[in-house]
Image (tube, rainbow, N blue to C red):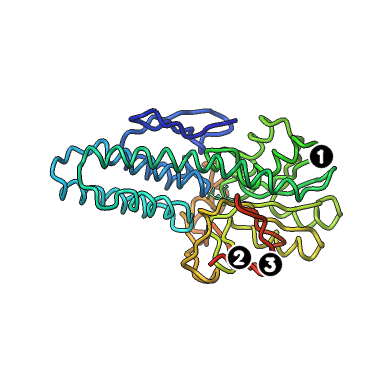
Amino acid sequence: MIVPLEWKGDRLRVLDQTKLPKDEVWMTLTNYRDVAYAIKTLQIRGAPAIGIGTGYGIALGAIYSKETKPDKFASELGEVFATLGATRPTARNLFSAIERMKKAIGLENDIEQLKRILVSEAVAIHAEQIQADRTLSILGASLIEPGATILTHCNTGPLATAGYGTALGVVICAFAQGKVEKVIPTETRPLCQGSRLTTWELKQAGIPFRLITDSMAGYVMSRGIVDAVIVGADRIAGNGDTANKIGTYTLAVLAKENSIPFYVAAPTTTIDKSIATGTEIVIEERAPDEVTCIAGVRIASDGTEVFNPSFDVTPARYITAIITEEAIARPPYNFI
Ligand code: MRU
């Protein structure tokens, strides 16, 4: 299993996802600001991995603090929470991790004790994600029929969760059970997480695949060669509306039109119980050059105006089932 985040007791090793698949570059981070930068720039990406990186970032902010007075230490920690919290607004796991780390602190104000608590909480978040991945993957695999061809979007494997994977975890598990014939990953423009990262993971797992561009999905589904679509999630509202990588909504509508089951796989830490519907989900917008350029090469003409929403929201009515580590939920969804 690929482990893109490694905690080394006092530092975080990170596999830089922006360099894959060409180069496997590992970074060693000790400063929480570098962790925030890594999350913002997608060196660490995928909602669950972002949550884990956030936990470790907070732990680093605490252990490298030089403050000796509890009130000054608390205000420095406040800065750590704010910096990490300002990186990627849509990924629910980022905020689940911050809320959990704040809760772990409780009323403790001994600085050394706080450092120990925050490190062990970050390690626990990571361990629980690995466990959740495995459980939801086994549950999700029960939905896959033998001989299946599965279409998936973006990247939801070990890289995206620092574990086993969510949607791709289901695929990997079903493949191990002999039920998956082929995977169709979409390219996932603008940043090509499908063509760069999912193909890399599928190759490592030895799973046969055939890459398509995002615009080919309708044609491929209409030919009757897709048995199921499985995607991950960045945030799931109480009613099941799901924010995920831009293009997911299009795939869900196409799946319904072609009578193909459309599954979402995510840990319960991605569910946002504070919002009733997807209309309340904040959608991250990213820099124009992600659209005007491919792999650093400009392809759009100078002065081109760009709209670059990183995610979209798939209404719950398009989702056949939501797979978490607790259960396979079917409509009508009610997570609150
Ligand atoms: O912008 P990214 O690459 O962080 O977006 C990732 C996705 O949209 C994934 O599908 C989602 O986070 C689920 S990862 C298991």
Residue hosting label 2: 240
Q: Is residue 242 left or right of residue 128?
A: right
Amino acid at dot 1 = Glu
Residue at image mark 1: 181
Residue bearing mark 3: 331
> For this rendering, which residue is in front, 188 or 261?
261
Query: Is the CB–ligand 1 distance for label 1 below 8 Å?
Result: no
Residue in the image at 14% along x and 40% along y: 68
40 lies left or right of 270: left
User: Element type at marker 3?
Assistant: loop
Q: Is residue 186 above or below residue 254?
A: above
Quadrant (top left, top right, bottom left, bottom right) of the N terminus:
top right
Q: Given the image, on which type of amino acid does mark 2 rest?
A: Gly
Asked which secondary structure carries label 1, the reply is strand
| Alpha carbon separation for disc pair 2 and 1 | 29 Å
* Picture coordinates of residue 163, whole percent (x, y): 55, 38
Q: Earlier in the sequence, mark 2 or mark 1?
A: 1
Viewed as shown, does residue 66 lie left or right of 129?
Answer: left
The image quarter containing residue 38 is top left
Depth check, mark 2 against mark 1: the one in front is: 2
Q: Is residue 98 left or right of residue 154?
A: left
Which amino acid does the dot numbered 3 rest on? Answer: Pro
Residue at 62% x, 41% y: name it: 134
Residue lying at 65% horizontally and 47% vertically, measured from the top left: 167
Contact? badges 2 and 3 (CB < 8 Å): yes
Q: Position of residue 149 (x, y in %)?
A: 80, 46
